[in-house]
Image: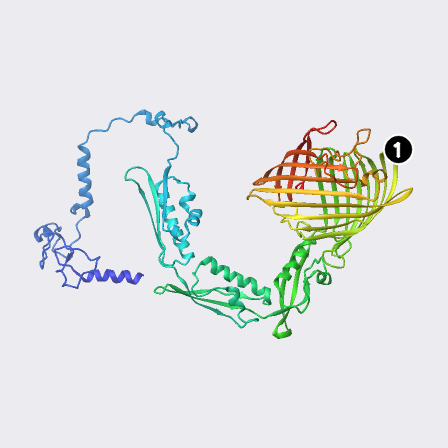
């Protein structure tokens, strides 16, 4: 850089000459094409073409030079005697002095300026009155949006749902904001047209006052779709598959189809989904290429696919420092056989089964290559389960209230894997105004086979209701297949055995008074359910069917065998996106024994939050001479409700009906009805419900208002 500066300075000097008796002057103008450097000194004003005129005449120049002695050896004159010509700065100073002398003396300074400034706290910042009255409300302009050209290709609704102008609601702070939104919508229109295959589509936006100078702003987006581009050739670059043409069949793009972005992306996603379901776990779909022909309005489509090896299932292997389940137990959970063609749906199912155990903080299931050859040119892949055991202990609690049952608090402590694999111990208790219970249970999930649960339990229970008071001890054993919120199953069941010892009070009709009795009961309860609903705790569509049967023997002096049967059906139908109509019907019968020979706790009752709302718990049905419910051998119940949800809240009006009968057949006579309304708070673990109901045509002794609070829908 420094060399360059020097070269320019030298170039400037090359175009000048110094002439005695003159200052710097420029030589004659260069010939055409030989310009002087830009920083060369310019010619003085008295220069003419081809001639240099002196700035100071020679005589004046000579006169200005001080006279020196002709004797070269003479001493120099004293410096004081030398009076050089005044410099330009001195001349300027003299002129300035003369000008200043021509002005009058300045007046004396005002003493106010010498005073100290006031304190900052005393300084008043209140604006003048005329400023305070100015309206500070922000200015808002309104505009109208006009769209043309997209309706004919079916994009108008989609454009409006994404439009910046539409989302602005026809209001903006200024016209520049409206113009910016219009430009964004212009780009949006082009993108939308290209997404449907209109690659020549253009859009123009404008903002103007219509009519002129009216103050009515109109933002317009005018689109011109142009010609529709269609697929020309469709080429898949991949190794041969088994069966042949598998990728082309799953891709399902054909020459002549419009080049629609959604359809093309969906077709490629289908290939990524279907190949791992048909033996290709490592298939990867590459980047598509579409070459457009502007004359024919076609696009040649090319898709590379790396299919990887065709695979068969191998072994299950596990990985992780804190393992909750062994590879042997995980093998029992799988629903595929070793040597079968790989299907990713089977590995997804295995992952869901592992999550449902609630034993892991993290768990993943993925195929890994082994390099071992399988049958028919396949490769064996193992299933790698990466697992990290989570906390095995759980504390849970539940609270509820209903008229007739009062307050009910339930808590439990669970160790889900105290006896591996999946051997849980559960300790639970109930504390309520009318019920107290303590129980201990051992449960082994996936016992011997997937989805089968074995459980044995021991419980002590005290119940004190209007119908009866009982002290009960139960020893039970059962095998079951259950639904959970994580793993909702279509078919569920249980079967088992119970031995119950109970001391209860009852109204003894033969003695016309209440007395207590002790019963020993042996039962073989069973249940089967079929569930086609879409949610376990908050269903919105579908139906459920449940059947309970329990052959039992009651022993009090003599053995009296009988059977308890119950059938229930529920149905859910959405009427709109926010309203669901739900209905329920339930009937039951006890055959083979007289009502008065049954322990009161084994009879059927109706009324309450899970039965007929509007009535107290066990309030419906026959009553003893002392006015207390005695239960019956059959019953029927019906309910219908409309569940209206808005956000996380809901309102549910409902009507329930039901009755209990002394005979074994529910005749439907003397049906009682209850009506009410409920509120719902929807959470991630299910709805919290609060229902308030009253009986229709209330009779003496029945509740006026009944309140029910619990988790989950009524049915």
Q: Could you tell me residue 541's position as x and y percent?
A: 61, 47
Image position of 115 (left or right of 354): left
Determine whether 627 is above or below 496 in the image.
Answer: above
The N terminus: image quadrant: bottom left
- Quarter of the image for residue 175 reads top left
Identify the secondary structure beneath mark 1: loop
The C terminus: image quadrant: top right
User: Looking at this view, is 520 or 146 the one in front?
Assistant: 520
The total of numbered circles placed on residues is: 1
Determine whether 490 is above or below 169 in the image.
Answer: below
The colour scheme applied to this rendered structure is: rainbow
Image position of 531 (left or right of 303): right
Residue for point 47% across, 57% down: 262
- Quarter of the image for residue 95 reads top left
Q: Residue furthest left?
A: 59
Q: Could you tell me residue 17's position as x and y percent?
A: 15, 60
Q: Mark 1 = which residue? A: 510
User: Looking at this view, is 394 or 6 the one in front?
Assistant: 394
For disc 1, the neighbor class at 10 Å (few under 14, some 14 to 19, many from 20) is few
Q: Residue furthest right?
A: 557
Q: Could you tell me residue 572's position as x and y percent?
A: 62, 45
Q: Could you tell me residue 696's position as x and y percent?
A: 67, 31
Image position of 651 (left or right of 63): right
Determine whether 139 is above or below 199 in the image.
Answer: above
């Amino acid at each position: 850089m420094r060399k360059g500066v020097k070269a320019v300075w030298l170039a400037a000097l090359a175009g000048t000459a110094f002439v005695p008796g003159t200052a710097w002057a420029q030589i004659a103008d260069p010939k055409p094409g030989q310009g002087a450097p830009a920083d060369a000194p310019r010619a003085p004003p008295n220069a003419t073409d081809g001639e240099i005129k002196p700035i100071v005449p020679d005589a004046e120049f000579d006169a200005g030079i001080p006279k020196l002695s002709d004797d070269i050896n003479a001493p120099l004159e004293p410096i004081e005697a030398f009076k050089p010509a005044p410099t330009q700065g001195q001349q300027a100073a003299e002129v300035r002095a003369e000008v200043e002398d021509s002005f009058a003396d300045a007046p004396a300074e005002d003493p106010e300026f010498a005073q100290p400034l006031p304190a900052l706290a005393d300084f008043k910042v209140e604006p003048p009155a005329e400023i305070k009255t100015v309206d500070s409300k922000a200015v808002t302009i309104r505009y109208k949006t006009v769209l043309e050209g997209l309706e004919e290709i079916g994009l108008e609704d989609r454009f409006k749902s994404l439009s910046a102008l539409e989302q602005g609601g026809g209001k903006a702070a200024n016209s520049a904001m409206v113009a910016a939104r219009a430009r964004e919508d212009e780009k949006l229109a082009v993108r939308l047209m290209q997404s449907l295959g209109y690659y020549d589509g253009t859009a123009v936006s404008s903002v103007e006052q219509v009519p002129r100078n009216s103050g009515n702003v109109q933002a317009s987006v005018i689109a011109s779709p142009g010609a529709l581009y269609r697929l020309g050739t469709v080429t898949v670059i991949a190794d041969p598959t088994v069966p042949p043409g598998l990728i082309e069949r799953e891709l399902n793009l054909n020459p002549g189809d419009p080049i629609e972005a959604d359809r093309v992306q969906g077709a490629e996603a289908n290939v990524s989904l279907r190949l791992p379901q048909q033996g290709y776990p490592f298939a990867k779909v590459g980047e598509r290429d579409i070459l457009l022909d502007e004359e024919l309005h076609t696009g040649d489509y090319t898709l590379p696919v790396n299919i990887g090896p065709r695979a068969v299932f191998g072994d299950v292997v596990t990985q992780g420092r804190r393992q909750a389940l062994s590879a042997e137990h995980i093998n029992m959970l799988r629903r595929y056989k070793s040597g079968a063609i790989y299907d990713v749906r089977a590995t997804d199912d295995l992952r869901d089964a592992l999550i449902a155990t609630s034993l892991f903080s993290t768990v993943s299931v993925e195929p890994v290559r082994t390099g071992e050859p399988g049958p028919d040119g396949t490769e064996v892949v193992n299933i790698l389960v990466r697992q990290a055991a989570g906390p095995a202990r759980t504390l849970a609690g539940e609270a509820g209230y209903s008229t007739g049952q009062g307050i009910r608090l339930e808590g439990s402590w669970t160790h889900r894997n105290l006896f591996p694999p999946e051997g849980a111990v559960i300790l639970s208790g109930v504390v309520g105004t009318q019920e107290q219970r303590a129980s201990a249970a051992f449960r082994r999930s996936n016992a011997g086979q997937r989805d089968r649960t074995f459980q044995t339990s021991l419980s002590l229970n005290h119940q004190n209701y209007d119908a009866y008071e009982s002290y009960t001890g139960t020893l039970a054993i059962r095998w079951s297949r259950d639904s959970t919120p994580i793993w909702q199953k279509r078919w569920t069941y249980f079967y088992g055995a119970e031995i119950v010892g109970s001391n209860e009070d009852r109204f003894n009709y033969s003695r016309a008074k209440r007395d207590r009795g002790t019963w020993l009961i042996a039962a073989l309860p069973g249940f089967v359910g079929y569930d086609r609903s879409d949610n376990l705790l908050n269903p919105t569509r579908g139906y459920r069917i449940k059947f309970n049967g329990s052959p039992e023997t009651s022993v009090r002096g003599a053995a009296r065998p009988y059977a308890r049967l119950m059938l229930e059906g529920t149905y859910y139908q959405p009427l709109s996106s926010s309203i669901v109509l739900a209905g329920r019907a339930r009937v039951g019968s006890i055959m083979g024994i007289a009502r008065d020979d049954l322990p009161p706790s084994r009879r059927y009752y109706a009324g309450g939050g899970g039965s007929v709302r509007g009535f107290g718990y066990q309030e419906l049905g026959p009553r003893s001479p002392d006015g207390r419910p005695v239960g019956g051998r059959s019953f029927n119940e019906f309910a219908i409700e409309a569940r209206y949800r808005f956000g996380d809240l809901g309102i549910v009006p409902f009507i329930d009906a039901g009755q209990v009968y002394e005979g074994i057949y529910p005749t439907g006579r003397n049906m009682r009805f209850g009506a009410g309304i409920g509120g719902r708070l929807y959470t991630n673990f299910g709805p919290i419900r609060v229902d308030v109901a009253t009986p229709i045509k209330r009779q003496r002794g029945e509740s006026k208002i009944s309140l029910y609070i619990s988790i989950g829908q009524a049915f």
